Structure formats: structure tokens, C-alpha cells
């Protein structure tokens, strides 16, 4: 079962973290604080996050350096980063943020509704991806059980396949609705690309499930869920 998504809030000023928590509390997700780049990197060692809100100006390791470390790690390099900054030095400064791996760059003071909407998109994408992984893992476990029992993969119970197909269809429907919403809202290109990647993985999983149907020639290899 998919749990609440975790959102990492990184800022050296407690009042800014408190403000972010107030803005994002309506999303009903798990908000994790980090008061420095080092503390953020430590949190990322053990927990998975849907999105990171990262302040640019921090003593010691600033936001750009923190983002560079995040993107160098295989475990964390695909986590979306939204930079928050109280300064604006023009296009060059913004470009540095995107070059560091950010999916968005927002100047303070920002519109709380806009920030919440942007974060919500990445939370939705994260939740759909988690659901997809759960379905893939369930299929793998069922196939492994059939192998251990010496059963023919082409003779999987029809009821199980029907249940898995229904679950996958529900995820597909939600992913399609999210993609349409992104198109209608003219969302960030990064969010649209992430949604498209999710749809491609859904398509691969659907093909693998269809190959398990009786008469389809046996089980198919499962697509990578990374």
C-alpha cells in the first residue's frame, strides 16, 4: 500500500521552514525539515522523497552545492528539486539553478497557491510511480511462487490476473488524468516529461501482464522500474 509521500524542506531559517509547512500542510503529506545542506544529504541517505524544496542561500554548503551532491548520487539523482531564493540576479543566476539540476526556480516572496500546486504535481507523480512499482512487485512474487511450486506460468489463476489487470487499469486511468491536467495547465516541461516516463513504464507493465494471459505464449520479461 502506498504511504504518504515525503517532502524535504531545506532552509537555514526556522521561520522559513515554518512558513513552508503552513503552505504545504493542506497536501496532507509528510514534511521533513533540514536546516542545512549537510542535514538534507543525511536525510536523503535513509528516506525516499517525492520532491525537495531547497533554499539557495545557506551558510556553509549553499543550495547549488547541495543540489550537485544530490544529483551525483544514484539513489537521489532523480528526485525533483525546486529552488527557493530571496535574491534575483537575473537570467544568469536562474540558469545556474537549472544547471544544478533544479526542475523549477522560484523567487521569494512567492505565491503560496502556485508553490503548493507545483509541489502537488510532483507528489502525484511520485505516488503513481509507487503504485506502479507495487503492481510490478506483486506480479514478480506471483511468478516466483509459481516457479517454486513447479507450476506452468501459463496456468496462473484467471482470478489473479483479472485482479492485477484491474489494479493496473486504475493506475493507468489516474496517470492519464494527470497527464491531461498537466497539458491543460501548461505545466513545467520537467513535470510533463516525468509523466510521459511514467506512462511508458505503465505501457511496458501492461504488455508484460497481457503476456501472462492463457494462450499468450508464457510470461514476458518485466520492464525495469528504475
Image (cartoon, rainbow, N blue to C red):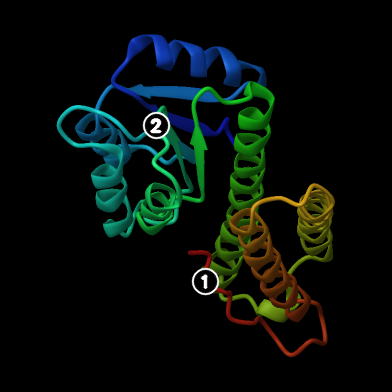
Q: In this orientation, does residue 1 appear? A: no
Q: Which class describes the residues within 10 Å of circle 2: few (<14), some (14-19), or many (20+)?
A: few
SS of the residue at dot 1? loop
Residue 16 vertical position relative to residue 222 in the rendered view, above or below: above
Q: Give the x, y percent position of residue 173.
A: 84, 54
Residue 176 vertical position relative to residue 25 in the rendered view, above or below: below
Q: Give the x, y percent position of residue 68.
A: 27, 52
In this orientation, which residue lies closer to the viewer: 177 or 192? 192
Q: In this orientation, does residue 152 appear? A: yes
Find residue 87 and name its label: 2
In this orientation, which residue lies closer to the viewer: 147 or 38? 38
Residue at numbered disc 1 = 224
Q: Residue at x 66, y 42 (%)?
A: 121
SS of the residue at dot 2? loop
Q: Residue at x 78, y 64 (%)?
A: 161
Residue 113 vertical position relative to residue 188 in the rendered view, above or below: above
Occupied quadrant, residue 168: bottom right
How far is the residue under mark 1 from the one under mark 2? 41 Å
Q: Residue at x 41, y 16 (%)?
A: 17
Residue found at the far left of this picture: 60
Find residue 35 and name its label: none
Amino acid at each position: 500500500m502506498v504511504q504518504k509521500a515525503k517532502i524535504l524542506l531545506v532552509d537555514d531559517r526556522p521561520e522559513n521552514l515554518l512558513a513552508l509547512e503552513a503552505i504545504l500542510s493542506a497536501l496532507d503529506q509528510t514534511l521533513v525539515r533540514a536546516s542545512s545542506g549537510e542535514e538534507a544529504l543525511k536525510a536523503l541517505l535513509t528516506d525516499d522523497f517525492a520532491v525537495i524544496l531547497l533554499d539557495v542561500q545557506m551558510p556553509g554548503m549553499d543550495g547549488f552545492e547541495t543540489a550537485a551532491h544530490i544529483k551525483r548520487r544514484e539513489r537521489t539523482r532523480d528526485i525533483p528539486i525546486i529552488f527557493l531564493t530571496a535574491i534575483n540576479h537575473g537570467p544568469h543566476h536562474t540558469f545556474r539553478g537549472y544547471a544544478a539540476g533544479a526542475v523549477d526556480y522560484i523567487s521569494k516572496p512567492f505565491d503560496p497557491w502556485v508553490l503548493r500546486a507545483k509541489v502537488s504535481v510532483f507528489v502525484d507523480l511520485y505516488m503513481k510511480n509507487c503504485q506502479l512499482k507495487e503492481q510490478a512487485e506483486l506480479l514478480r512474487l506471483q511468478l516466483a511462487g509459481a516457479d517454486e511450486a513447479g507450476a506452468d506460468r501459463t496456468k496462473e489463476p484467471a482470478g489473479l490476473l483479472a485482479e492485477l489487470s484491474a489494479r493496473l487499469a486504475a493506475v493507468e486511468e489516474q496517470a492519464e488524468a494527470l497527464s491531461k491536467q498537466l497539458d491543460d495547465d501548461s505545466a513545467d516541461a520537467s513535470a510533463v516529461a516525468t509523466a510521459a516516463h511514467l506512462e511508458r513504464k505503465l505501457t511496458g507493465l501492461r504488455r508484460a501482464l497481457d503476456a501472462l494471459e492463457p494462450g499468450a505464449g508464457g510470461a514476458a520479461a518485466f520492464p525495469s522500474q528504475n
